[in-house]
Each structure stands twice: as structure tokens, then as C-alpha cells.
């Protein structure tokens, strides 16, 4: 059952759930729900409209709640956290990983965070406070403190006996971390190596020193790239003082990579990365209103450009028919350049050294497509309106707008990033404004020269 | 040096490279380049314009080429593969993982693939052929054959001695896979458990059976979800007959997740996921031309709608000024719904059960925003043109277009997916067409009723 749900919490399962709820078979459902791995229960909650979601939540056993909560996206989690009292909050942090507790606490009001922290034993509290002291989007915020450390002077045999005494070795432990007397990271001993090494060998003779520890302030996106490039399962994290603080595991990095991939696409449509797919209608409408409002302002700017040429349009109404073509094509061509550069920046491919080459390439490519489509649009306009001036004007405007839009699309993300503004969000709005304004201005402006 | 480059192959390094090349310091550069991990060299190549890229490639030692090639994206790799002869191709497959060799071979013409396969020893050839028999985007295509298998009847001690005899344990080995006489997967023994278990214990008494093997035909995206939900480092892959065929490791799954995240964003701009950021201008222009051409057709469809109302525009030129606002706002609102549903589908959240709820939510949200912006746009139009009819008409058109566009944006991806058409690519084009056509038709159509 669990496996099937993992593979496809799809139509069938959701339908079964619906049926079960409608028939009031809540005991059966409760058992099924609580037998699922927390990640599957979380997925089920995220895939449910609000009413069903609240209903399902009530059926989840108290001791499952913590595990499910940490698998939920921030927005959905916030909804359930808001409904919990301090006793419940204290209960759900029990037995959770330090980084997961920190994630939960970050979403709570400060006074409540304090109360939960005070209820923990001093060692756990200190650990959580360490993680909390780093940004959620940094190596420190991603790390866990469940490292197994060993000393360089011990023998492999001592380590093997030490491990055997452990009740459990933390998940995703692929390396034992070797630290010196000052608790500084000095090397690693992979389990795969440990298993093949002569028990009498000394750790410092066999340990590997090929892996540099990650500094706790490193941004999460950079951590993801380090993991991707070096194919890591886990990596040690150190503080300013080079002291080992914990480790980051690939499961948390996978979440970062998944979110990075989504973020740009969502931003380009003015949506928050964490947006709940099944948020209620009013909340959805209110959130989207801001983005639509900003776009409306830019639409009015474009309209005011058209307004400047009302006399010309009054003379030649065909201009009104053709003008959206010029603006729209510029927006499309610019959007391609914008997207390519945003992707390139996410992959860390773009720097000031190759930016010049990239911009000249875009200039050339934009101009080529400008000429190509100018000729075709001019011909189509001729067939439609039999007016050589309109054909000439729309052809020139197409070349101008496609070239400008592509250049703006390629350079905007870099400029915005340098100003610490989200390139995907602001870039899309600004590009549309430019391609509309330049499109209408070049087309109607040129036309007004010929027709006045 | 290596670590520094991993963290930021940025301005400084690229500038140093440029300088080194310009000063002809190729020996020094050659040494530096060949001391980098293959993933970093690949990143450097991908971040370089064509000329620099070819130059760098020539400096890479023959024995490094295979490792670098497998880290490159398909398009860049194809470029280098095309320039290699059969002897070179045979050389670069040596010592590579089976799944990586299969990846390379998939990009070569069939006759050359055959020749390379024939040059391999029969065991390796058979393994590569097995992987090649599955789609690149399936579990079989992602898998490697470097599993360590053990028998259920052995003791832990036998396994420990068996491992000690291994010259090397494959990377990312977190579990030993337990198979029966028929080579069917029956359980796993985590290294972390092996290290804590009494040497005299029998494997079948201590092995875990909590992990279901992945069927070789499972799509890559589903493999990624299984890894994400269960926080796996590696997973066994079985064929139709339940026989163990190999295993998938998290590093390959991370690539799938990274590509999934990019794919939708790139598709929405009509770009290929694998598009080389530094492709030459002509190739870039030619590739983008197709998408622009399709968009031009839709732009002419929208223009023809305006063409139907030339007489009305001729009477009231203000209509030409305001009409792009209606079309544009519909496109923006619809784009938000489209993006949200595409993301929801990628996360496996949307099914026929909750689609109905989602569409009614979008209908409600679209209508609310329609009314809000209708009122504001109507007021703005009044202030601008002092014409109550224009205000009324644009208000009604806004409500119609925003509601329709949002509904179309939310339902298109699901419909297209069901028809096996890329929802991001086709959805964006079709939504623009709908929001333009409905925007112009509702606004100008209503206006023509009042002004004629």
C-alpha cells in the first residue's frame, strides 16, 4: 500500500479517500493514513483542497504529526502550526532532527519559539539555537548536528568497536569525520574504506583529506552546486573558527535543488515559490492581485505610447490592427533571451568575462530573427493592406523591437541580480514594458513620419 | 585551487584563463586544467564561448576526456563527440561507469555505437547493452550495474571478509543487496547496520525488507519522486522477471531533478532544456526562429480579430489605445494559473479528483480579480477619455477575459498532458492566443454594439 501510494498518489487513491470520507469510514481511513510514511501523508495533504485537508489532518495520530509537518511546504505547514497550542508544539519537536526542529521554530512567533526552546534539555536547545543562528538558506541552516566523529590517533579496530556500541548510526552516514583536539575537521573515513582497511591501521594514516568542509555561512545554492559537482552524500560544516559544527546530507540538498528549479519559473509568473497549489479562492485572488496591478501600470504606460499617436491611427486604422504583432513578437524574442540567461545564471555559467560575448551573440541572433520576420511580416502586411508604407514601417519596427528586446532580455537579469532584485520576477515585468513601449513607439512613430 | 574553482568558477578564474591564453601560457594552463575534477572542467567548458571552448578542449589530456565528456550537457558533448574518430571514442569509454558509457553511445550514430561495443569485452558489452535497451529517461537507463550482492544464508562475518577482499567498493554504496538463488532482490543490508551487527548473525535474520526495488521501466521522474520521498542514496533496479539488474544512485537522480526544474521554465519560452548557453549566433537564431514563427501565426490570428472591427476603431480611436490592456491583463492572469498548474503537475499534486476543485477555485479567483481590475480600469479609462461607454465596455471585457484566461490557463496543461503534448511549450502559445483573441473580441465586439 505504502509503495503504491509513493509511486502514484493519483486518481485512484484520492478517489478512495473521498469515498471513504463520504461513507464515514473514518476508522479505516485513520489506520491507512497513519500507516503511510510521513512524506506520503504530507503529499496527500498538499494535494487536497482545504476542506479535505483539514479533515485528513484531524485523522493523523499525535505522534505522526511532527514527521508529517516537517515534510510539508512552508505555507501548508504554517496553516497547521497556527492551529496548535504550545503543548502540542512542544510534543511535535520531540525526536525530530535538529535542522527540522529549527525549520519549524523559524515559522513560529518569537515568544512561542522561546517557550518551546525552554522546554528542551540544554544540549538539544543549544544545538537548535546554533542552527537557528544561521539563515535558513545557508549551510548552517541546512546542517544537522548528528555527526559521528573520530580521533586521528585511534586504530581502525577501536573505531569498529566504538561503532558497534552505537545503538544507531544516523541515516546517510557515509563518512566518519576525523577531528583533532580542537574539534577542527581534518579528514574523513568513508564506511566503504573502513570495511576494507586492516583493523590495526591508524586513522590518520588511512583517512582521506580530499573533501574541504563547507563554511556555515555558504549560501544554500552554492552548497547544492558543491554536492552536485562532487557527487556527495554528506559534507562536514565548520564555523568561522574551523570547528566542526555538523554535516549536511543530500536529502536536504535535493530539496534545495528542487526549489531552485521551481523558483525561477514561479517568479516569472509573479508567484511565490512556496505557493500552496490548493489555497482558497480569496487568498489566491488577493495574492495575485499585486502582480496583476503592477502589470496594469506597465500596460497603461504602453497604452499612453499608443495614445500619443491617436491622430496617425485615426488616419490609417490598419496601424491599430498590426501594432500588437510588433509588440508581441518583441516580447517573445526577449523572453527567450531572458529565460536563457536566468537559467545560465542559476547554473553559475555567466560572469562578466563571458557576458560581453553573450550580449553580442544575442544582438546578432536578435538582429537575424528581426530581419527574417521583418521580411515575412512586411510581405503579409502588403498582401493584407496593399500599402507599401505600412510594409516598410512594420518591417523596420520589427527589426528594431526584436533587436532591442533581445538585448534587454539578455542584460536585465544580470543588472537586476547585481542590484539584488529577483531577475525572474522583475525581469519579466520590465521586459514586457520595454517590448511594448519600443514596439508601439517604433511602429507608430515611424508611421507618423510617413503619414503626417 | 580545485576547491576554489568549485565554489566559484567566476570572473577571476575566467579572466586568468583568458589572460593565460592571450599570453600563450598554455603549458601552465594545461596543467591547471588537467588538475581540476572533471565536473569543474566540464563547467568551465560550458561557461565558455565557442572559440575559447575549443581551445580549452585541445588542452585536456586524452585520459581526462572521458570523465569530462560525461559531465557535459548533451548539446555541448555532441559537439566534441562529432569531432572524434573511432579510436578516440573507444579510448574514452574505458574505465567509465556503465550508465555513463550508455549515455555517450546514445548520442553516436548506430554504426559507430556498434564498433565501440564490439571493442569491449563481452561482460562489459552485455552490461552496456542492457542499459541501452532501456530509455534514457527510465530507471533502466539511469541504472548502473556495479552492485555488491550477498546471499541470505551467509553470516555477517562472511560478508565482512568478502568485503575486505574487494579492491574497491563502488561509490555511493550504502546498502549491500541481498539476492536469492534466482538473483531476485529480497532485501538490503545497510553498511551502517552491518557495522553494528554481531558477526555470527545470519544475513536473512538481520536484513531489511522495507525498500521495494524499482522496476526498470519506471520513468525517471517517478524514480526522482521515490528517492525524494524516501530519502534514498541508492535503490535496487529489477527487470520484468524480478531479477536484480543494477542500482540507481542519488547523483544521477539529482541530475534528473535539476533538469526537471529547468525544463518547464525553458519550455515556456520555447527553448530546449539542453540548449547550450553559449551556442553560436546563427545556430541560436535558427533554433529560436521556429518558436517565433509559431507565435507570429498566433499574432496574426489576434490581428485578424482586430481587423474585423476596423470600422469601429475608425469611429472611436480610443479603442485602439486601450485594447492591448485587456489582452495583456488576460495573458498575465492566465499565465499565473498555467504556471501554478504546471508546477502542481510536476509535483504530482493534480489528479482528476482535485482538478474540479482547482478549476472552480481558479474560476472564482479569476472572476474576483476580473471585477477588481475592471472597476479600476474603467475608472482610469473614464479619467482619460471621459466616455462612459468606453468605461463600461472595457470593464465588462476585463471581467470576461480574465475569467476565461484563468480557466484556460488552469485547464490547458491537464488537457495537453493527456494528449501527450508538452504543457509548458504548447500551453504558453495557446494561452496567449486565447487571451489575445478573447480580449480583442470581447472589448471591440462590445464596443461595436454600442457605437454602431
Image (cartoon, coloured by chain):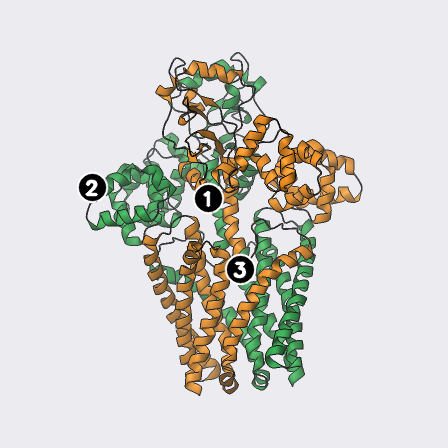
Chain colours: A orange, B green
Front residue of B411/A311: it is: A311
Residue identified by numbered label 1: A221
Which is more foreground, mark 1 or mark 3?
A: 1
Tags 2 and 1 touching, CB below 8 Å: no
Which of pointers 2 and 1 indicates the residue nearer the eye? 1
Report the Cα–Cα distance between label 2 and label 1.
Answer: 34 Å
Residue indicated by mark 3: B426
Q: Position of residue B139 (x, y in %)?
A: 50, 39
Label 1: which secondary element: helix
Nearest the viewer among B177 and B122 is: B177
Secondary structure of the residue carrying tag 3 is helix
Residue located at (32% from left, 53% from top): A353
> Farthest residue in the right direction?
A24
Q: Earlier in the sequence, mark 2 or mark 3?
A: 2
Q: Tell me, for residue A126, which label it has, or none.
A: none
Q: Mark 2 = which residue?
A: B27
Amino acid at each position: 500500500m505504502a509503495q503504491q501510494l509513493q509511486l502514484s498518489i493519483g486518481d485512484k487513491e484520492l478517489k478512495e479517500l473521498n469515498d471513504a470520507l463520504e461513507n464515514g469510514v473514518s476508522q479505516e481511513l485513520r489506520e491507512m493514513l497513519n500507516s503511510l510514511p510521513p512524506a506520503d501523508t504530507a503529499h496527500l495533504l498538499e494535494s487536497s483542497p482545504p476542506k479535505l485537508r483539514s479533515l485528513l489532518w484531524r485523522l493523523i495520530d499525535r505522534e505522526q504529526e511532527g514527521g508529517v509537518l516537517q515534510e510539508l511546504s512552508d505555507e501548508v505547514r504554517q496553516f497547521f502550526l497556527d492551529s496548535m497550542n504550545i503543548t502540542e508544539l512542544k510534543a511535535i519537536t520531540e525526536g525530530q532532527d535538529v535542522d527540522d526542529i529549527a525549520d519549524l521554530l523559524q515559522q513560529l512567533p518569537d515568544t512561542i519559539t522561546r517557550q518551546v526552546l525552554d522546554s528542551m534539555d540544554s544540549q538539544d536547545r543549544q544545538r537548535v539555537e546554533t542552527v537557528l543562528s544561521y539563515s535558513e538558506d545557508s549551510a548552517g541552516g541546512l546542517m544537522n548536528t548528528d555527526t559521528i566523529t573520530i580521533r586521528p590517533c585511534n586504530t581502525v579496530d577501536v573505531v569498529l568497536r566504538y561503532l558497534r556500541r552505537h545503538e544507531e548510526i544516523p541515516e546517510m552516514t557515509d563518512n566518519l569525520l576525523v577531528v583533532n583536539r580542537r574539534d577542527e575537521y581534518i579528514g574523513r573515513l568513508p564506511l566503504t574504506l573502513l570495511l576494507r582497511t586492516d583493523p590495526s591501521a591508524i586513522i590518520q594514516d588511512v583517512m582521506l583529506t580530499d573533501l574541504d568542509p563547507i563554511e556555515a555561512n555558504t549560501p544554500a545554492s552554492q552548497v547544492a552546486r558543491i554536492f552536485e559537482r562532487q557527487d556527495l552524500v554528506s559534507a562536514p560544516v565548520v564555523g568561522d573558527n574551523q570547528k566542526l559544527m555538523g554535516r549536511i546530507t543530500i536529502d536536504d540538498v535535493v530539496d534545495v535543488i528542487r526549489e531552485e528549479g521551481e523558483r525561477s519559473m514561479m517568479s516569472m509568473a509573479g508567484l511565490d515559490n512556496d505557493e500552496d497549489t490548493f489555497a482558497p479562492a480569496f487568498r489566491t485572488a488577493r495574492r495575485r492581485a499585486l502582480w496583476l496591478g503592477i502589470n496594469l501600470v506597465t500596460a497603461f504606460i504602453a497604452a499612453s505610447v499608443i495614445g500619443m499617436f491617436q491622430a496617425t491611427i485615426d488616419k490609417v486604422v490598419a496601424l491599430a490592427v498590426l501594432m500588437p504583432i510588433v509588440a508581441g513578437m518583441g516580447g517573445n524574442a526577449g523572453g527567450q533571451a531572458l529565460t536563457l540567461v536566468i537559467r545560465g545564471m542559476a547554473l553559475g555559467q555567466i560572469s562578466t568575462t563571458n557576458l560581453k560575448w553573450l550580449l553580442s551573440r544575442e544582438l546578432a541572433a536578435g538582429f537575424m530573427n528581426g530581419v527574417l520576420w521583418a521580411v515575412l511580416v512586411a510581405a503579409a502586411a502588403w498582401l493584407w493592406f496593399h500599402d507599401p508604407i505600412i510594409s516598410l514601417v512594420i518591417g523596420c519596427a520589427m527589426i528594431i523591437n526584436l533587436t532591442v528586446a533581445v538585448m534587454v532580455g539578455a542584460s536585465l537579469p544580470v543588472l537586476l541580480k547585481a542590484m539584488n532584485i529577483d531577475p525572474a520576477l522583475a525581469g519579466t515585468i520590465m521586459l514586457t514594458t520595454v517590448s511594448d513601449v519600443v514596439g508601439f513607439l517604433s511602429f507608430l512613430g515611424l508611421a507618423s513620419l510617413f503619414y503626417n
